[in-house]
Amino acid sequence: MVVADRNRKFGEQVSKVEDKTENIDFALRTINSKVSKLEKQRSILKEEIVYLQSLSMRNNLMFSGIPELRAGII
């Protein structure tokens, strides 16, 4: 009787551990999926920042020492 009771309790504990493990596995899969999506978003945003920075630098170019041509004079 004592052995059977201990076996039952042990079986219940094992079952609880299995349930918790399944929940943790599900949570990890969910987190990994979200992390993957965030990494892709980060990559896209990084590319956009580089593009916008290059546009900004291009629009801010200043040249000196080059004579300007006046309209009608060649």
Image (cartoon, grey):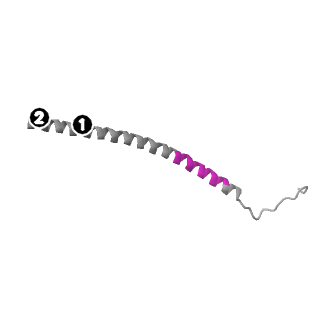
Q: Is residue 62 above or below residue 42?
A: below
Q: Which residues are magenta?
A: 41-55
Q: Is residue 68 left or right of residue 2?
A: right
x, y percentage for residue 2?
Answer: 9, 38
Q: Which residue is mark 1?
A: 15
Callout 2: helix, strand or loop? helix
The crowding category of the residue bearing disc 1, from other C-alpha atoms within 10 Å (few below 14, some 14 to 19, many at least 20), is: few
Considering depth in this image, is 56 or 7 the residue closer to the camera?
A: 7
Residue pictured at 85% horizontal, 58% vertical: 69
Locate residue 26: give its quadrant: top left
Residue 20 drawn at (x, y percent): 30, 41
Main SS type for the magenta part? helix
Q: Is residue 60 above or below residue 32?
A: below
State left or right for residue 22 relative to residue 62: left
Q: Tell me the quadrant of the picture where the C terminus can be found.
A: bottom right
Q: Which residue is pictured at 21% across the width and 37% down the height?
A: 12
Can you identify the residue that label 2 sits on?
Answer: 4
Residue reaching furthest right? 72
Q: Does the stretch in magenta take in 51?
A: yes
**In 3D space, how far apart are the residues under numbered discs 2 and 1 (Cα atoms)?**
16 Å
Q: Which mark is residue 62?
A: none
Lower position in the chain sequence, tag 2 or tag 1: 2
